[in-house]
Structure formats: C-alpha cells, structure tokens
Image (cartoon, rainbow, N blue to C red):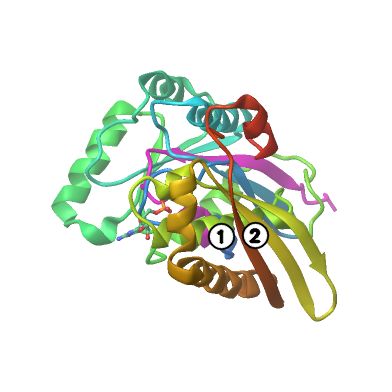
Amino acid sequence: MEEKKHKSGFVSIIGNPNVGKSTLMNALVGKELSIITDKVQTTRHRILGIINGDDFQMVLSDTPGVIKPAYEMQNSMMNFVKEALVDADILVYLVSPEELELKDEVLFEKIKKTKGPLLILINKIDLITQEELEKSVAHWQNIFPQASVYPISALRGFFISELLNILIGILPNSPAYFPKDQLTDKPERFFVNEAIREMILKRYSKEIPYSVEVITEEFIENNKIIKIRSIIMVERETQKGIIIGHKGSALKRVGIGARKSLEKFFGKKIHLELYVKVSKNWRSSSEQLKRFGYNN
Ligand code: GDP
Ligand code: MG
C-alpha cells in the first residue's frame, strides 16, 4: 500500500492595518495567540501559529499591517512583513470590503508577481450587502486573475473551517518543520508582554499605547502558579505618570486585566507584578530595539 504523504508549509497572512489578520489567525489556530484591538499597529512582530494534524502541519504567520514606516521600529515591522512574503508557500492577502489597494505599492506589485498559491480573502462581510460584496470580488479578481477570492468573516467564523480545508489541500508535500505538539514559535514571555500591551492599548488613548514596550524579567512556573514580573517601558516621565494613574489605580486595572487573560492563556493561576520605567526614545534606538526583539 502506498504511504500517505505528509504535508507541511508556511502560510503568510498579510494586509493593511485593522483588516482582521490577527482575528483570522486566532480563528484558524483556535487560540488567542495574537492580540486584537480596533487600533492600528496592534501587531508589531511576526507571530507564528502552528496547526498540527496527523498528516499535515500548517505554519501560519500573522504580521503587522502594511504601513509607510515613519520611524525605526516601523521599518523593522515592515521587515517582518517582507520576510513573511519571501518565506510563504501560500500567501493569504486579507482585505476589508471597502478597500481597494495595499498601503505600500512595492509590496502590492510583489504580490501580483507571486508564483505560489495566492488567496485573497475579503473579510468582515458581515458588515456589507450582497451587492457590495460582488463588487469587491470583481475588483480583486480583476487585479489578481491568478488568485482565488473568498468572502469570509473571521470574527463571526464564517467560512473558517472551509478555508482551513482549502489551505490544507494546497500545502506542499514536506515533513513537519516543528515538533507536532508546538503551537507557536514565540516563548511564553512574549505572550505575557503582549497581554499587558493589549490592556494598555485598550485602556489608554492618544500616543500612550504607541510609546510603550513591555519586558518580562521573571517568569517562574510551578504546578500551581506562575509568578511573573514585568516592566512597562515608556519614553517620558509624563507618560509614566499617566500609565500609573492616581494612587496607582490605572496600573492596577491593567494588571488585573492582563492577569485574567494570562490565566486563560496558560490555564493556571497567575501572580503578576508590574513596574513602569522610563527609557528615552526606545523606538528610534537600534540598541534598545534589539532588546525588545525587533532585531532584523
Ligand atoms: P489586524 O490589524 O489586521 O490584525 O486586525 P485585528 O484582527 O486586530 O482586527 C481589527 C478589528 O476588526 C477588531 O476590532 C476586530 O474585532 C475586527 N474584525 C476582525 N474580523 C472581523 C469580521 O469578520 N467582522 C467584523 N465586523 N469585524 C471584524
Ligand atoms: Mg494584528
């Protein structure tokens, strides 16, 4: 009897900010690996989500939204996107119904020339009429004749299991790239940092969320509890004051929210200590960016 071939490959999800890339990745993986907010630039890194089956392994990349870089960190964010494009066996280009093009023309042209399978997914179709949808499908099929265009809703779970089967169907024959019990390439501390950053994105307005980076200095796990100590880095003294709030009340709420989401993520009780430190201009200093993992 012929042995059944194993399939494995990299699937990159790219698109403009806020179209639902992280929501889609979480829906496909079935776990909240990527933080989601209604703010742009929520995702700063390339995050792998791995889906394992007996005869396949799909490695999904969630990427930062495509933007025109204005400072050093954003340059690095766009490098994560380009990397994901080069590594992809399958390219998933996610769009929202009203949009017509990618924010970076060079990248847009690259996608047009991509040789491998290309899926264009029109997301958030729960928000539009049938007529608008048909217009959007025609628009994208016209620009990318070689692509398969599918309407989906990542949030409502529409066409997600179908999509998963389509993707598995076109994975190349290959042995697995990662151990079959692995869910992501990122260490535990990364998810701690992200959970804290998600709370900050949700709780503070204006430039505060964009001036923040989180480092987890301690992550100690025993059978009952995980003890975590993390530092919230800001760029200015005034931002530190805002983050902490009156008698520490604002920071306390961030801690409570992050602890709850981490308890869900790790399935364990969490003890979380949070500190705030000022680190001037971390977004523009290469040295500092390396420390925060933007080192490419
Ligand atoms: P990303 O920046 O591309 O990663 O986008 P996110 O996944 O962070 O989602 C951006 C916003 O769009 C969030 O508020 C999501 O809840 C919302 N969103 C994502 N998918 C859908 C969808 O299918 N329908 C609707 N109505 N909203 C969605
Ligand atoms: Mg995202």
Callout 2, which amino acid?
Val
Q: Secondary structure beneath disc 1?
A: helix
Magenta region: 1-27
Find ligand 1 in the image and state its quadrant: bottom left
Q: Which residue is mark 2?
A: 192
| Above or below, comparing residue 56 to residue 72 in the picture | below
- The residue carrying pointer 1 sits among few (fewer than 14), some (14 to 19) or many (20 or more) residues within 10 Å by Cα, namely many
Marks 2 and 1, how far apart at CA: 6 Å
Residue 214 is situated, as x and y percent measured from the top left of the image, at 60, 50
Residue 4 inside the magenta-drawn segment? yes
Q: Which mark is residue 196?
A: 1
Residue at point 39% right, 58% down?
Answer: 204
Residue 28 seen in this snapshot: no
Residue 179 seen in this snapshot: yes
Q: Secondary structure beneath disc 2?
A: helix
Q: Which mark is residue 265?
A: none
Residue at point 64% right, 33% down?
Answer: 288
| Above or below, comparing residue 119 to residue 167 in the picture | above
Residue 278 is situated, as x and y percent measured from the top left of the image, at 57, 45
- The residue carrying pointer 2 sits among few (fewer than 14), some (14 to 19) or many (20 or more) residues within 10 Å by Cα, namely many
